[in-house]
Each structure stands twice: as structure tokens, then as C-alpha cells.
Amino acid sequence: MTAPLLRMAGMSVELSAGTSQVDIVCDVDLELDRGERLGIVGESGSGKSMTALAVMGLLPQRMRVRGELLFDGRNLAGLPEAEYCSYRGRRIAMIFQEPMTALNPVKSIGAQIAEGRRLHLGETRADAEKRARALLDRVGLPAPRFNLDLYPHQLSGGQRQRVMIAMAIACQPDLLIADEPTTALDVTVQAQILDLLDDLIEDTGTALMLITHDLGVVSEMTERIAVMYAGRIIETGRTDDVFARMAHPYARGLFAASPHGAALAPRQVEGRPRLNAIPGIVPDPFARPAHCSFAERCAFVQPDCQRAIPPLDLIDTDRNVEHRAACFHPRERMVAP
Amino acid sequence: MISFIGGRLVSLVLTTLVASVIVFLLMQVLPGDPAVLMLGMNADPDAIAALHRQLGLDQPIWIRYLHWIGGFVVGDFGMSLTYSVPIRELLGPRILVTLPLALLSMAISVVVAIAIGVYAAANRGKAGDTVVMGIAQVGVAIPNFWLALLFILLFALKLAWFPASGFAGWEGGIWSGLHSLILPAFALGLPLAAILGRVTRSAVIETLGEDFIRTARAKGLTRAGALWKHAVPNALIPVVTIIGLQFSFLLAGTIIIENVFNLPGIGRLVFQAIAQRDLVTVQTLVTLLAASVITINFLVDLVYGYLDPRLSRGGH
């Protein structure tokens, strides 16, 4: 078996605030093979976006990566900036959440798409623009309606996100990170953008790391998922298996709290189905407990939950993919067939 | 774009006309009869009346305005009361001093401001930022004439690199003229650069926090690449606004600086005309200065359209 494309081993993201340090992301173990699709889910503040930015080497200033972050056999943690630049956009690309502000308002979309190819592949302006034209066609923005000399303000949110996607795939990266790529878009446009992403991944064989809080999106787009809570992975496995069992109480809560999950779950009472909110709030990163960080909000809490941090234990193996959960008392009953 | 420029041109002409009316009326309400000034306090009333007729001062005010502005439009500004020569002849050689001085000061101000502003923004919170912005803070507080005196002491008297005053003229070649303008241009431009530099710094810091900078970095641009290719072009929009506003300060500054360096320019002419109550000359020069400020702001509007496609190109 060849080495995975991306391998995080005991990776943490440390934030220094004054004299104190805190791990925003703790001890993450995660692998991603070439062409594989991985979803990372969790609520705001769970550390999912920071995990993505850690891979890109674009963490905010006071944060740094500890542990192993191997990309194609090379440890990216502590890689010199100049070398990192040759990975970004070339081999690892990223699509951001806010298409309205993620494009430069004073540069034409053609120039912005062509920029990466000129930078990494040394193409001339003419060649790179020819390629940008082909990319725009590929993401569903055909000429003459969508010319290279358009500016972002002349496009809608969905069209801008298509431009972002064209920029990201311009140099045929090995890994595409999409951080909430559809969250800011209308529902109908969301589906179109996801279809486009799905298509492109299928065609190019690029690996996908999809970050979202939308369980519907992960279940459609990914083969494997990792559920994050308070900076840690608390459940991971094949998407189908995780959805079927939801071994970690937090995963169940997340599921019950989402419209997608609630629609699948059997109705318990007659009348309008209600979403179940998870009681309590995510612990502040500076005041995370030394035991299971979900214990205070957990409906199934036991005395031992308040004594230690549960390791990410193997609970099942399906088609060579391990299903793991960080819970002392994983749920057994299936939630969905 | 055409209608954008057309609209701006119309407003340029109208603003200039309004400015000319205000200047003209101000000159009328100023105390002091030019004829009395020219002939002396003890002049014969008949002679004064004759001079009034000769100067057209016996006409109603609106006739005099129309007469003046009509000539102004075709470039006939009338006669200077003190020099008894057409004002146009006074202007010619002086514009060749003031215009290069203004442009040079502007260029110094813009280049220095962008250099220190971008440098400080890129090194925000570090020692370099503190030092550069500390110097700029002092620069904001320094009046240009005091800086001019310091420059004369250091670069003209002590080091003898530049002349302390006077203008060598352009007849001896570009360098001979430029040589006498360098010290005045720095004295005029640097205090403006201090203000503009602070504006540049905060504009660049603001754009560096935008999402599209992160996009540029995700594309593989270095920190410096994202700064110069993506942050600075966006930050230039507020900077250009301030450049337009500073132009009027710059023209006011030429009046002072031309007097300090004894340069035969428009500023010095205005100063002398005011002192000698040469009202026709004053109102012509002030209107011309107002027109040039308005023109510069028109150019600023055009530059906006170029810098920010959102203004010159319609939405979807």
C-alpha cells in the first residue's frame, strides 16, 4: 500500500495568547488518500476550519502547528515559507466560504484565474488566459456571457463561487480543501455548486477535504467523515457507517439538531417535527476540561466520563475502513438502516 | 464611462463658475478703491472719476462680472493694476515655476507616502512601523516653512548642494531649473507625505485583513506578492482621494514656499498682488487656482474609475 496523500499524526494547532498557550486543535490523527473524499463536520469553533488552514499553512499569526502534518511524504509543519508557497495553489488548493469577499474587487476574473498558472507553471499571460477561458467553461460560465474581463461585482454569489472553484483547480492540485463552500449560497445554487464540485472531483481524481456543518452535504459528497468537537475528532469512519450508528452522543446530537437528520429519524411524536438542540455550549478553548469535553452536555454521561479524556477507540471495521469513536460508552443501537 | 466623464465635465465647469462669482463678489466687498490706491489719497476727484471710467468701475456690478469672466474664458484676463501689463504676460513665466514645483512636490509626497505607508502596514506593530510612523507623526506637525528654513540651513548654507533661494530659469537646461526647485519641493511635499503616509498605512492594513488576501495567499502568492499585487491596488482608492484633497493645501503651500525661497512663481505673484491691492490680478489668480483644484479633483474622479471597476462598469 502506498503512503497516503495527507497524513496528520498527533497534530495540534497551538494558539499563544499572551503568556498562555492553548490547543485550538488537539491531537488529530487523520489520513487522506489520493482521490479520496473526506468530510469534516462539527459546529462553529470545533476546530474544523483551523485544521484546514493548518494544512494550507495559512493559520493566523499567533497559531502554529505541532506534530506531524505529512503531505506526499513531506512534513509541512515548520516548512519554510518560500517552499510552502510552491505547494499552495499548485498541489493543495482551497475554496473559501464567502464568495462575495474572497475575490479581489479590482481585478478581472480572468486575471485572478490566470494568476496561479502564471505563478506556478510560468505560463505567459496569453497561455494562462487561454487556460482560464477553458476553466470558466468547465465551471459552467461560458463565453460570451462570462468573459475573462468581467469583475467580481458583475457576478452573483453562485457565479463567484464558480470562479473560486476555477481558481482552485487551475493548476490541477492533488488536494482540494473546500471550507463551507455552499454555506453562503441560496439553497438552489448550493445544489448546483455541489454537483459541479462532485463532477470535477470525479473527472480529475483530486482528493477532497470538505469542511461543513451540513450533514446533508457530507452524506452526499464524501466517503469518509470525521466529526470534530472542541478541537478533537470524536468520531470517524465510513460516512455510511457513522451515519448509521452515530456512536458518539455528540454525533447523535448533531444529527438530531440538523434538518437533514431530523427528517431521516423516526418521528417520536405526532405533529410538526422539532429539531433537538444540544443543551449547553461548546467549552471555551481556554477552559476545556481535563475529561471528555462533551460530558457536561451529554445525556448519557457516566461517572468515568468526568475522569479522563476518552481515546479515539476502534469500535468496528468496515471494508478496511476503521470506525472509531472517542467515547467511553459508545451508543450501540443503529439510528438509521 | 462616456456619460460618467460628461457628467463630471459639466460639474467641473459649473463649479468653476460658482467659484469665480464668489471670488468676484469677495473682491467687491473688500474695502479700498483701486483708483484711490493708484492715484494716492490726495488725488483730484475728477481724476479718480476718470480713472473709474477707464477701469470700468462706474459700470454695474453684473456688467463688470460678465466683462471679466467673458475675457477670462478666452484667456484675456485684463490688465494688472500695479504692473500695467496684461495679466496673461505675468502668468506665462510664473506658471513655468509653480507648475513644475507643484508636480514635483506631489510626486515626492506620493512616492514617499506609499513607500512608508506600505512598509509600516506590512510591518504593523513591529519596530519599523513604530519608527516610521513616529517620524511621520512629527512630519504632520512640522509647518512647511520651518522645514524650508531647516533645509536652507543644512543643504544650501552648510552643504551647499542646492541654492538657498532664487530661480535659475529653464534657459540653462532642465537641471538648472530643477536644481532650484528641489529643496522647495521637498519642503512642500514631505509634510504632505507624512499625512498621506498615515492614510496609506491604515488603508493597506484594512485591505490586508480582507478575505481576498487570504485567497491570494492560498493561490501561492508570497506575503509580499499578495501585498503589492492585491492589497496595494485596493488601498490606492482612499489614498487617491486624499491626494486630490491635498492638492489645494499644496497650492496654498506654494504661496508660502515661493516666498521663503524667493521663487518667481504664481504663489509669489498672488502674495504681491494682495499686498498691492491689485484686485483684478488677485481675482484672476484666485479663480485660476480654484479652477486647477477643481480640475485635479476631476482627474481624481477619472482615476477612481480606472482603479475601481465597480464605479466605471455596471453591475450584472
Image (spheres, coloured by chain):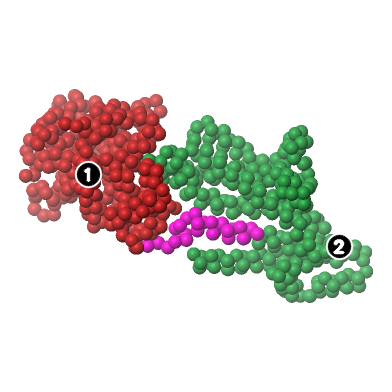
Chain colours: A red, B green
Q: What type is the residue that disc 1 sits on? A: Gly
Q: Residue at x 73, y 63 (%)?
A: B284
Between B131 and A95, the one lying in front of the other is A95
Q: Quadrant of the C terminus of chain A?
A: top left
Is residue A228 at least partly visible in the picture? yes
Residue B96 lies, in percent from the top left, at 73, 55
Place of residue A54 in the rendered image (x, y in percent of width and height, measured from the top left): 31, 35
Q: Nearer the viewer, residue A106 or A113?
A: A113
Residue segment shown in magenta: B292-316
What residue do we see at 15% from left, 32% from top? A325
Q: Is residue B67 above or below residue A251?
A: below
Which label sits in the foreground, 1 or 2? 1
The numbered mark at residue B37 is 2
- The residue type indicated by label 2 comes to Leu
Residue drawn where x is 72% and y is 49% of the image? B174
Q: Residues within 10 Å of mark 1 (few under 14, many from 20)?
A: some
Q: Residue at x 50, y 57 (%)?
A: B306
Image disc number at residue A205: 1
Q: Which chain hosts label 1?
A: A
